[in-house]
Amino acid sequence: MAKLPKELEKAILELPSKEKDKLLLKLISKNELLSEQLYFQLLEDESDLKFKREEIKKQILKVSKMYHDTPGWMMMDMRDLSGRITHHVKVTKDKYGEIELNLYLLDMFFENQASHLENYSGKTDSIALYIAKRTELILKKLPKLHEDYYVEFEKSMNLLLERVHTKCPAYYARQMQLPKFWSY
């Protein structure tokens, strides 16, 4: 973000309140992410956060059950869903939801697309690397949560690590030195 020259900053601060409000609203309306962030901060609460998570989970479940011709098409859908999770986190700053939703995403695809994720091959190479990297990301984000939440993620994290080490991502899991077990 560009820094304003001191003179301009001073001039803006000296503007009448009504003019500053107009400028502020005009600027906010041009930034969709900022608008969504402010809407969430000012007009929504914790119950809305849970609803937003549930909506993303519904999308994940629906897409994970769809027929995918190839692992490549499946990975495109996973990336789209990951983008939705990332957007949700940017808007809400929901660190818990980021971990919960990413674990759910990988879990649902392992559950519903087992045939594509069972064995490593040239066709599964990209998705195997993608899953290993998403797993690594979750492992890096977990310590940033309060430790009271760890118990809620232990079972699903260990199931994911087991799958990552025994299914198509196993090669990358070893290469990236992902743990075979997670405990707090």
Image (cartoon, helix red, strand yellow):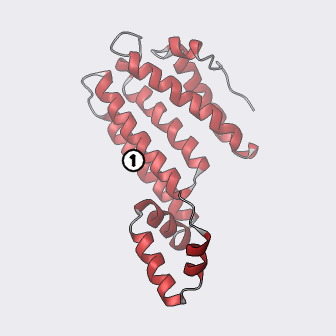
Residue drawn at point x = 26 percent, y = 30 percent: 67
Secondary structure under the numbered disc 1 in the rendered image: helix
Residue 18, given in percent of the width and then of the height, sits at: 49, 89
Residue 47, compared with residue 65, is above or below; it is below
At which x and y percent is residue 9?
58, 74
> In the figure, 183 relative to 83: above or below?
above
Residue in the foreground of this view, choosing between 150 and 174: 174
Q: Nearer the viewer, residue 32 or 64?
A: 32
- As rendered, which of 167 and 87 lies closer to the eye? 87
Does 6 sit above or below residue 96? below
Q: Which residue is mark 1?
A: 58
Determine which quarter of the picture holds residue 168.
Answer: top left
Give the residue displayed 27% in from the left and 22% down from the top: 70
Label 1: how many Cα within 10 Å (few below 14, some 14–19, many 20+): few
Camera-side residue of 31 and 149? 31
Residue type at the position of mark 1: Lys
Left or right of 174 in this view: 87: left
Residue 138, horizontal then vertical, whole percent: 59, 34
